[in-house]
Image: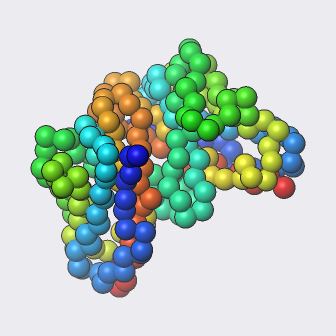
Amino acid sequence: GAVVSQHPSWVICKSGTSVKIECRSLDFQATTMFWYRQFPKQSLMLMATSNEGSKATYEQGVEKDKFLINHASLTLSTLTVTSAHPEDSSFYICSARDLAHPTDTQYFGPGTRLTVL
Amino acid sequence: SQKIEQNSEALNIQEGKTATLTCNYTNYSPAYLQWYRQDPGRGPVFLLLIRENEKEKRKERLKVTFDTTLKQSLFHITASQPADSATYLCALLKAAGNKLTFGGGTRVLVKP
């Protein structure tokens, strides 16, 4: 149980285009999902907290107009990188907290590798 | 400012030995401390959670200790195997429902 999927697993796009990444909790419901970014040889940095049915909460320094987050259901959150630039190239990972098990354990997706040319 | 430090140098260890990793934090009073495993190109996988009022937690060959006075957690992998080779991340949670803050991770390499 407690599986989180991400799609796509990798994407290459041209500078200036937008890319959407999906995060799904497959066998549990998640009112809260988190989006992280990880650069090579660095740790995960939280970008935003996504709450079902409400606006996301962004961390300091993360542009909300550039990284659009939508959490339309208890099993799906999407991150859209708008007008992507090469510096947005990174490993994007989502996680979800299981509503039925309030132990604050987060289950992570496998990540999406974004390369902006 | 809040800081979570893990040894950035890789830990090379012989198969069968115990690997010990440290996680130190400053300017922080976490309610929970968690350890995750991350393989290259993959998302982290949850291993263990320990609460502030717990001293030690075990799961199979893994053991975690939590010393809130020293502001330190130790993570042990006993009888290590080459399959244990990965990066191990500690993460702190200030209170229930809050966000996780991750350390930089320590890479472990178990040699046969």
Where in the figure is residue B22, as x and y percent of width and height? 28, 63
Residue B65 visible in the displayed image: yes
Tell me the quadrant of the picture where the C terminus of chain B can be found: bottom left
Q: Residue furthest top?
A: A53
**Is residue B84 toward the left or the right of residue A76 in the image?**
left
Say above or below: A30 vs A108: above
Q: Which residue is located at x 48 percent, y 43 percent?
A: A108
Display coloring: rainbow
Along the line of sight, the residue nearer the viewer: A115 or A23: A115
Quarter holding residue A22: top right
* Location of residue B29 in the rendering, given as x and y in whole percent from the top left corner: 26, 40
Say which of A106 and A83 sits in front: A83
* Percent coordinates x, y for residue A73 in the rendering: 56, 19
Q: How many numbered discs, if any?
A: 0
Give me the residue at 41% from left, 32% from top: A97
Question: Which residue shows up at 23% across the image and 65% down it?
Answer: B76
Viewer-proximal residue, A70 or B103?
B103
Residue B37, quarter of picture: bottom left
In the rendered structure, the answer to whether residue B95 lies left or right of residue A66 reads left
Which image quarter: residue B83? bottom left
Let me know if residue B36 appears in the view.
no
User: Is residue B30 toward the left or the right of residue A116 in the image?
Assistant: left
Residue shown at 60% from the left, 57% from the top: A39
